[in-house]
Amino acid sequence: MTLQIATKLNIIPIRRLHPEAKLPTFATKQSACFDISACLPMGGAIKAYTNKNELHTRTLNEPQVLLAPGERYLIPTGWAIACPEDYSLRLYSRSGLAWKQGLMLVNGVGIVDSDYRHEVCVLFINTSRCATTIEHGMRICQGEFVSRLVSNQTFQLNEAHAADDEWFTTQRTGGFGSTGVK
């Protein structure tokens, strides 16, 4: 069965891969992003890396997973999406989970390319000093469709050579916060 999210621009097909999956929803009409929930039914398998960087797969005995400090989990959503061509689905941490529980996306922003048609999963890490739980159906991140086109232009990446040094000349020095905080 194929379900869809209606947006102002497009209708985007979503396929439910698990009967207990909660499909993405916009919380309000003015929401910039839609909410994405965990699909953690009992008996499901989930992959994780321990805080000692050891890969393991767990079978869920209950509809939740406990993340110890430093552990990374690949949390399934239970659905796949047909992202429009020239768009990507961007996944962002929920600010409340990051602030209150230390749960964040491992890669900062998850990117689902337009040609990916498998289950969307979310990579989480527990950055706190306490174990925390993700439950089945819990809203775990937010999603947004982002165009890769700017003013209908595409970009080509070309290697620059020594003759192109003017492209890389700047008055700035340092990096990573070198302009300060005030």
Image (cartoon, helix red, strand yellow):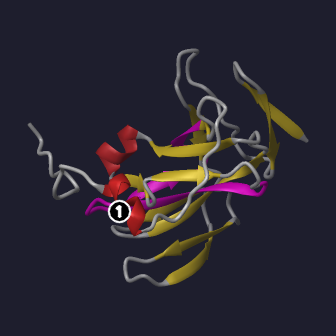
Q: Name the residue type under label 1.
A: Ala
Label 1 residue SS: loop
Give the residue displayed 68% in from the left and 52% down from the top. Answer: 113
Q: Quick check: is 8 in the magenta stretch?
A: no
Tally of marks? 1
Q: Is residue 99 left or right of residue 37?
A: left
Note whether 25 is above or below 2 in the view shown. Answer: above
Where is residue 91? Give x, y as percent: 54, 46
* Quadrant of res 127: bottom left
Give the residue displayed 60% in from the left and 61% down from the top. Answer: 62
Q: Quick check: is 131 in the magenta stretch?
A: yes
Classify 10 Å Cα crowding around label 1: few (below 14), some (14-19), many (20 and above).
Answer: some
Note whether 38 is above or below 7 in the view shown. Answer: below
Q: Is residue 67 left or right of residue 121?
A: left
Note whether 12 is above or below 172 in the view shown. Answer: above
Quadrant in the picture for the C terminus: top left
Q: From the viewer's side, name the closer residue of 164 and 16.
A: 164
Where is residue 68? Give x, y as percent: 38, 68
Q: Is residue 44 left or right of residue 146?
A: right
Q: Is residue 126 left or right of residue 144?
A: left
* Quadrant of res 151: top right
Note whether 136 is above or below 6 in the view shown. Answer: below
Magenta stretch bounds: 117-144
The residue at the far front in this view is: 163
The residue at the far right in this view is: 1
Residue of label 1: 131
Where is residue 117? Give x, y as percent: 79, 54
